[in-house]
């Protein structure tokens, strides 16, 4: 199943669910998944993109979906796991997801209206704020980025009721001060209910026992005191059309962080990067990294342009599509390459600023000494402060490999995180930075690890990735290392410390800093 939209709302619903309020309107930016635990045979099947009858709480049912049907969740960037008695309309939900993306949050919740049933005062709406940064999100209204959801799913699976999760989520994420928020600009109502339907699924004592176990495991029994770390006030937040204004200097629709100083230009750069023609929900990291890095280096805004109209092609294996296009005007190539072996070219429409590696450069006989390097090597600037290491190994899969049986084994095993190339670029870079070693079937998993100085190897998981390894050999040829062969990825239970140590011991990227400096200096004047 391919997602229709990039956001997902998930709930377990009983016979008196209010979920129809969430979808009563046009132009949703989210899909809806419902698990039905009621007993009255309510006819909710046509309300959702996925509807299943299964007794259980929302966290229990979500973990069941995550573990047993991961293909259903592939492609969603943000997931809102919500109680069925929450009152919101589609416009509020749309705005919630937009605000979450605009501020690059990891975890959030809509604030509760003043007349709601409120247990934690910090969750009550502050009318003067757009959002407040906090260490607490109430378990009935949890909005996750997919990256964060993958990190906390193990704890979620230990609490069928969800009790205790709101006490430990911030700790599991390293207690950040600016990535968890209560969204005051998007309030929801939580009406009082005399007898919650969920009480028929689990007793209150069972729920409390689960909460105590989570606290004991992740906070040594210490009770969390919800606090706020600051806020963004209403004034100046909305744009002229009332929409969400991005953070100052942010990379617009691409979801990047503040751009760094660089060259200034009079107009947006017209950049081509690959987008999936038939399924716009597929936003491959390596391709969507291109506008972020170009903005970072140039100091100018970037707009997506067609192959016929662009002035620059950067990150990605895109030279074949450039040469095959009917365009007549010249185009600049910077840090891009071929995807497969082939003949040399002297196409007069192509202006070379930098090429990905020596195999690509060798096919441009009229360009004797181009700058070499994949522009993705500059993605370390997107990270800011480095997060602590959390995982001995991270697995990056090309999006065509996401549903392979071996990847399913890693997903069920749970010890080694699967880093999807469909994550938002800044989330992906941060997730890679949390790993001690990376094994990747996607080229830009390798390149991101190199940009961050993380030992890594490429692996071949299937024959679905185009080019038979050409782009990997092209890129790795930059460094003159003797062994550029792929490593076999074993099943998760056979990953050993010796295997990881061997990857670290053999890892070498001589000349990396010089490559990056020359690559940045070679950015073309546009």
Image: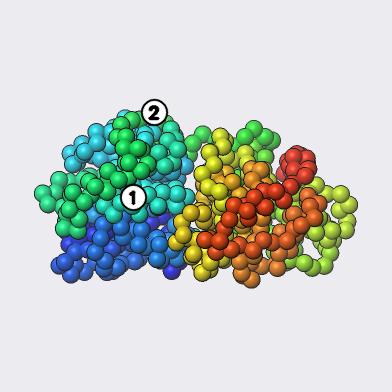
Could you say where residue 242 lies in the image, as x and y percent from the top left?
Answer: 39, 40
Could you say where residue 436 lies in the image, as x and y percent from the top left?
Answer: 59, 46
502, above or below 299, in the image? below
Mark 2 neighbour class, 10 Å CA radius: few under 14, some 14 to 19, many 20 or more: some
213, above or below 1, in the image? above
Please, what secondary structure does the residue beneath circle 1 have? helix
307 left or right, relative to 177: right
On residue 93, the disc is 1
Residue in the image at 38% along x and 56% along y:
8
Residue in the image at 26% along x and 68% along y:
53
Could you say where residue 147 lies in the image, as x and y percent from the top left?
Answer: 47, 50
Question: Front-most of 503 and 280?
Answer: 503
Residue in the image at 74% along x and 47% along y:
508
Residue identified by numbered label 2: 230
Residue 308 visible to an observer of this rendering: no
Could you say where residue 442 lies in the image, as x and y percent from the top left?
Answer: 62, 59
């Amino acid at each position: 199943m391919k997602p229709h939209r990039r956001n997902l709302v998930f709930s377990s619903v009983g016979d008196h669910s209010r979920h129809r309020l969430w979808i009563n309107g046009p132009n949703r930016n989210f899909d809806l998944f419902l698990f039905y635990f009621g007993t009255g045979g309510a006819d909710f099947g046509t309300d959702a993109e996925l509807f299943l009858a299964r007794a259980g709480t929302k966290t229990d049912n979500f973990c069941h979906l995550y573990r047993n049907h991961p293909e259903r969740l592939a492609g969603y960037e943000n997931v809102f796991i919500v109680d069925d008695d929450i009152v919101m309309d589609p416009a509020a939900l749309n705005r919630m997801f937009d605000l979450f993306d605009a501020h690059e949050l990891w975890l959030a919740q809509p604030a509760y209206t003043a007349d709601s049933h409120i247990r934690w005062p910090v969750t009550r709406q502050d009318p003067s704020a757009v959002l407040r940064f906090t260490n607490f999100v109430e378990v009935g209204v949890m909005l996750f980025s997919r990256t964060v959801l993958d990190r906390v799913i193990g704890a979620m699976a230990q609490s069928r009721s969800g009790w205790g999760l709101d006490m430990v989520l911030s700790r599991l994420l390293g207690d950040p001060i600016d990535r968890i928020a209560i969204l005051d600009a998007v309030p929801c109502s939580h009406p009082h209910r005399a007898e919650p339907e969920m009480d028929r699924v689990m007793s209150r004592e069972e729920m409390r026992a689960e909460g105590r176990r989570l606290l004991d495991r992740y906070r040594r029994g210490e009770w969390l005191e919800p606090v706020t770390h600051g806020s963004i006030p209403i004034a100046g937040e909305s744009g002229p059309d009332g929409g969400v204004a991005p953070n100052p200097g942010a990379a617009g629709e691409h979801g990047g962080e503040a751009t760094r100083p660089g060259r200034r230009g009079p107009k947006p750069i017209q950049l081509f990067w690959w987008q999936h023609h038939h399924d716009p929900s597929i936003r491959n990291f390596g391709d969507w990294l291109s506008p972020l890095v170009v903005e970072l280096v140039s100091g100018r805004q970037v707009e997506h342009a067609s192959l016929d109209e662009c002035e620059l092609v950067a990150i990605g294996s895109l030279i074949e599509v450039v040469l095959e296009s009917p365009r007549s005007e010249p185009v600049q190539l910077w840090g891009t390459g071929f995807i497969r072996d082939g003949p040399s070219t002297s196409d007069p429409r192509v202006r070379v600023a930098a090429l990905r590696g020596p195999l690509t450069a060798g096919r441009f006989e009229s360009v004797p000494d181009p700058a070499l390097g994949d522009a993705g090597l500059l993605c370390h600037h997107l990270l800011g402060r480095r997060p602590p290491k959390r995982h001995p190994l991270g697995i990056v899969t090309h999006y065509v490999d996401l549903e392979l049986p071996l990847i399913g084994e890693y997903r069920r095993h749970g010890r080694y995180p699967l880093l999807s190339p469909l994550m938002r670029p800044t989330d992906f870079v941060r997730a890679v930075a949390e790993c001690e070693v990376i094994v990747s079937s996607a080229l830009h998993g390798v390149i991101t690890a190199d940009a961050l100085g993380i030992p890594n190897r490429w692996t071949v998981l299937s024959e679905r990735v185009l080019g038979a390894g050409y782009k990997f050999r092209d890129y790795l040829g930059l460094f003159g290392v003797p062994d550029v062969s792929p490593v076999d990825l074993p099943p998760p239970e056979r990953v050993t410390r010796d295997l990881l140590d061997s990857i670290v011991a053999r890892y070498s990227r001589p000349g990396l800093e010089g490559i990056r400096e020359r690559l940045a200096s070679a950015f073309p004047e546009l």
